[in-house]
Amino acid sequence: MTVTATLELSIAPESADVAHSVIHEVLAATRAFAGNQGVEVLVDVTNPLHIVVLERWESLEADAAYRAWRAGDGASNLGTVLAGPPVLTVLTTSE
């Protein structure tokens, strides 16, 4: 079963000029991770410090393996540009 994950990010104002390059650097590894079917970065038109990362995964297992990797050896510097913790939501398509 394919899954879609959204990662809602609130960028710290003092990091606004470097945040997009940090995000895109981090997402290069996400795109290369086994089971990833695509990643999009969506920027709020009324608040450019509000970003939603839309990820597509081939299965719940692939998504879980990615999350475990990010929590360990694949930890990134994404937190250095955030105003608070990201909000992750994992979704499936309703039948």
Image: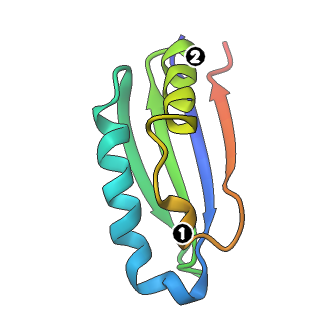
Is 16 situated left or right of 21 in this image? right
For the N terminus, give its image quadrant.
top right
Residue furthest front as drawn: 73
Query: Which of the numbered marks, if any, corresponds to residue 5?
Result: none
Residue 61 appears in which quarter of the rendering? top right
Give the vertical position of 43 relative to 18 (above or below). Answer: above
Residue at figure coordinates x 47%, y 39% from the top left: 55
Q: Amino acid at mark 1?
A: Thr
Where does residue 48 sit, x and y in percent of width and height? Answer: 53, 79
Q: Amino acid at mark 2?
A: Leu
Give the vertical position of 86 relative to 75 (above or below). Answer: below
Residue hosting label 2? 60
Q: Earlier in the sequence, mark 1 or mark 2?
A: 2
Residue at figure coordinates x 54%, y 69% from the top left: 80
Is 61 situated left or right of 91 in this image? left
**Residue 91 or 11: which is nearer the viewer?**
11
How far separated are the C-alphas under marks 1 and 2?
A: 28 Å
Where does residue 83 sit, x and y in percent of width and height? Answer: 67, 74
Residue hosting label 1? 80
